[in-house]
Image (cartoon, rainbow, N blue to C red):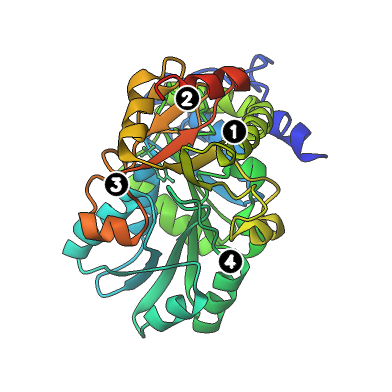
């Protein structure tokens, strides 16, 4: 079966009890146990719920994984996966990882004795240098946010195998449609389902997948014990969003490419960051490990005032955090996703006050481009 068919036909599209072409929202916390000596498949919804399970199996199928888990947000998924580690363990993470992941590692988990070293994940020698005897895992994100740097996923996996480490990746920006990290040997992939999986800016969710039975039982223990599970209504919304994943990713990527190429020709644009552009430093690499470039484009304007004027005058683009929805979103990383990062550190990472990030949606691409120049 081809991938586009698998998105719609993976065994989780028909309700086994009624034949309904959508697994219903099983809005129940508990289940009648007709025979107390025989354990029911479902007995309490924190442990298992048919709507959530349909989503978990779907995402596992789409990531070519043996096991899938759904959580109440992307951060709940990431935090729950990180909770499989122990006091005294050490993690090597990408320095330009999602802000929430940076925060939970450097503040929350640090409190419990889980140490993290943040490195430029695109430089394997730096990753290797950061590995210590207590290192247990390497946490990647590719493409990264907001500069869309590409990590050599297979290279990191090889390094991890040499030292016996677990590899994790945040696959949110690519979605399972464009990138299958488990096929590249990564142990655990996580997503904010709030973004491309849900796709409609109407639900928060997170997922984690793995092929390892041991890792799956560790994650499952946290999912049940910590309890940050996705509710049935939200699971249903993510499941519905996934049905159009291919159509959205293909069209949004096409418009992103058009906009990236157009931006590069504008005299008020300084630099464009999009891995689909042939001069992007990760252009070759991303083609080896993914089947697309995604729908997020960042760029810098020649002057800060210009970036602010664009945000002030756009009418079609929403000025907001988040990405991956059908509606186009314009973000300002220095005040939004990276506001918590100290100024010097931000500038070292290239996140400057003239940098804008676009999540390209499904509107007409001409309208989107015209809207960007309204304020100039
Ligand atoms: C949004 C996002 C998250 C966090 O997801 P939430 O659903 O907001 O908790 C994690 N990683 C990446 C790359 C994201 O874009």
Q: Earlier in the sequence, mark 3 or mark 2?
A: 3
Which residue is denoted by mark 1 in the rendering?
259
Of labels 3 and 2, the one closer to you: 2
Label drawn at residue 152 = 4
On screen, residue 322 above or below 101: above
Q: Earlier in the sequence, mark 2 or mark 4?
A: 4
Of labels 4 and 3, the one closer to you: 3
Q: Quadrant of residue 48?
A: top left
Residue 44 in view: no
Please tell me how crowded label 2 is: few (under 14), some (14-19), or many (20+) other residues with Cα within 10 Å: many
- Report how far apart the C-alphas of labels 2 and 4 lie in the structure: 33 Å
Which residue is denoted by mark 2 in the rendering?
372
Find out whether the residues at labels 3 and 2 contact each other: C-beta distance under 8 Å: no
Please tell me how crowded label 1 is: few (under 14), some (14-19), or many (20+) other residues with Cα within 10 Å: many
Q: Quadrant of residue 251?
A: top right
Find out whether the residues at labels 2 and 4 contact each other: C-beta distance under 8 Å: no
In the picture, measured across the screen, residue 18 lies left or right of residue 352, that is: right
**Residue 286 spot, x, y in % from top left:** 64, 56
Q: Is mark 2 within 8 Å of ligand 1?
A: no
On screen, residue 218 above or below 337: below
Q: Earlier in the sequence, mark 1 or mark 2?
A: 1
Image quarter for ligand 1 equals top left
Front-most of 121 and 297?
297
| Residue at x-position 67% and y-position 16% | 21
Q: Earlier in the sequence, mark 4 or mark 3?
A: 4
Find out whether the residues at labels 3 and 1 contact each other: C-beta distance under 8 Å: no
């Amino acid at each position: 079966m081809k991938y586009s068919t698998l998105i719609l036909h993976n065994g989780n599209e028909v309700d086994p009890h009624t034949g309904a072409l959508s697994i219903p929202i099983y809005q129940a916390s508990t289940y009648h146990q007709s025979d107390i000596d025989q354990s029911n498949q479902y007995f309490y919804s924190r442990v298992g719920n048919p709507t959530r399970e349909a989503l978990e199996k779907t995402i596992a199928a789409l990531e070519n994984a043996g096991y899938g888990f759904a959580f109440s947000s992307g951060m709940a998924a990431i935090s729950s996966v990180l909770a499989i580690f122990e006091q005294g363990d050490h993690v090597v993470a990408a320095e330009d990882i999602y802000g929430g992941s940076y925060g939970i590692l450097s503040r929350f988990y640090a409190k419990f004795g889980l140490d993290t070293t943040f490195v430029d994940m695109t430089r394997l020698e730096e990753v290797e240098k950061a590995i210590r005897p207590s290192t247990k895992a390497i946490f990647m994100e590719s493409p990264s946010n907001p500069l869309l740097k590409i990590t050599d996923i297979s290279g990191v996996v090889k390094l991890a195998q040499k030292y016996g480490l677990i590899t994790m990746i945040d696959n949110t920006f690519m979605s399972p449609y464009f990138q299958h990290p488990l096929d590249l040997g990564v142990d655990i992939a996580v997503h904010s389902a709030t973004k491309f999986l849900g796709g409609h800016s109407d639900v928060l969710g997170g997922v984690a997948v793995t092929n390892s039975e041991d890792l799956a039982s560790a994650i499952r223990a946290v999912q049940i014990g910590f309890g940050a599970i996705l509710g049935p209504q939200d699971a249903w919304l993510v499941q519905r969003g996934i049905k159009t994943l291919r159509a959205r990713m293909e069209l949004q990527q096409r418009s992103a490419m058009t906009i990236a190429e157009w931006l590069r020709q504008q005299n008020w644009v300084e630099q464009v960051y999009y891995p689909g552009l042939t001069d992007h430093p990760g252009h070759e690499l991303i083609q080896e490990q993914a089947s697309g470039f995604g729908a997020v484009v960042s760029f810098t304007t020649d002057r800060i005032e210009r970036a602010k004027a664009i945000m002030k005058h756009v009418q079609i683009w929403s000025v907001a955090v988040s990405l991956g929805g059908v509606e186009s979103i314009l973000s300002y990383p220095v005040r939004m996703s990276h506001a918590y990062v100290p100024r010097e550190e931000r500038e070292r990472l290239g996140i400057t006050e003239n940098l804008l990030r676009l999540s390209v949606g499904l509107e007409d691409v001409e309208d989107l481009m015209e809207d960007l120049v309204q304020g100039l």
